[in-house]
Image (cartoon, rainbow, N blue to C red):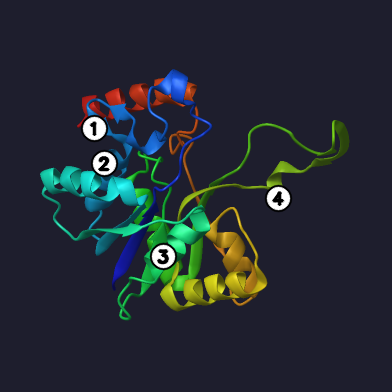
Amino acid sequence: MKVSVILPAAGLGTRMGREKSGVSRKQFMLLEGAPILIHTIRKFLRCPMVSEIVVALRPEDLDWARGLVHQEHPSRPVRFVEGGETRQQSVENALATLAPDTDLVAVHDAVRPFIDTDLIEQVIAEASHNGAAIVGIVPVDTVKRVHKNKIRATLPREHLVLAQTPQVFRFDLLQRAFASAREDAFSGTDESSLVERLEQVEVSVVQGSDRNIKITKPTDMELARLFLAEELAAS
């Protein structure tokens, strides 16, 4: 089974803030001397089910990132493609470079470096069986639906999931989902939302972890340093 991993990493990281972080793009911020992107790539290189990794980056970052990955001496191919202005465009650009014999495609946020290898394998196995699977967690807080600043409903948590990544799909299914979205000018916040529109498969949810954080703001870096220190201590 050929599994390709796409890491969209062309974002500008505006929520991180240039002044506080010192770097405007969060995927390049350093954790123990290595960019977050490299930590994420390392996790997928440790997973034996992964065949290749494709990273979508802004054009000005391609050569620099290639040099960083070359120093890692990756055991499997790590390729780079030019990303787009949005996550959706970046993933679609990467999809266009995959070989026809690709079976499954896993899309993962480049700034989620604490994904567990076992969890990667679980969601890939689920997608292999059902065609589509994502990682998600049940919210611990009460969730309200609002209009402006007025509550309209309290949503039962047992029917809610906070979507994480990886999100894994059959290659042909994901291609159709992106083609349909492009034709309809539909913009989704994740890949699952595009696949759901097709109404061809039910997307499974694999229980995720609250450690699988997405680093989006300066305070996340404090938690990231703690998690990394715990990983290094356990290794």
Q: CA distance from mark 2 to mark 1?
A: 6 Å
Q: Is residue 158 above or below residue 210?
A: below
- The residue that mark 1 highlights is 34
Kind of residue at badge 1: Ala
**Cβ–Cβ below 8 Å for labels 2 and 1?**
yes
Q: Secondary structure at mark 2?
A: helix
Which residue occupies 40% across, 56% down?
83
Circle 2 crowding by C-alpha within 10 Å: few under 14, some 14–19, many from 20: many
Quick one: label 4 or label 3, which is nearer the N terminus?
Answer: 3
Which corner quadrant holds the N terminus? bottom left
**Cβ–Cβ below 8 Å for labels 1 and 3?**
no
**Residue 64 in sight from this viewpoint:** yes
- The residue that mark 3 highlights is 93
Point out which mark residue 159 bears.
Answer: 4
Give the percent coordinates (x, y) of residue 134.
Answer: 50, 57
Kind of residue at badge 2: Ile
**Residue 50 in sight from this viewpoint:** no
**Who is closer to the viewer here, 203 or 112?**
112
**Who is closer to the viewer here, 33 or 117?**
33
**Who is closer to the viewer here, 2 or 23?**
23
Q: Secondary structure at mark 4?
A: helix
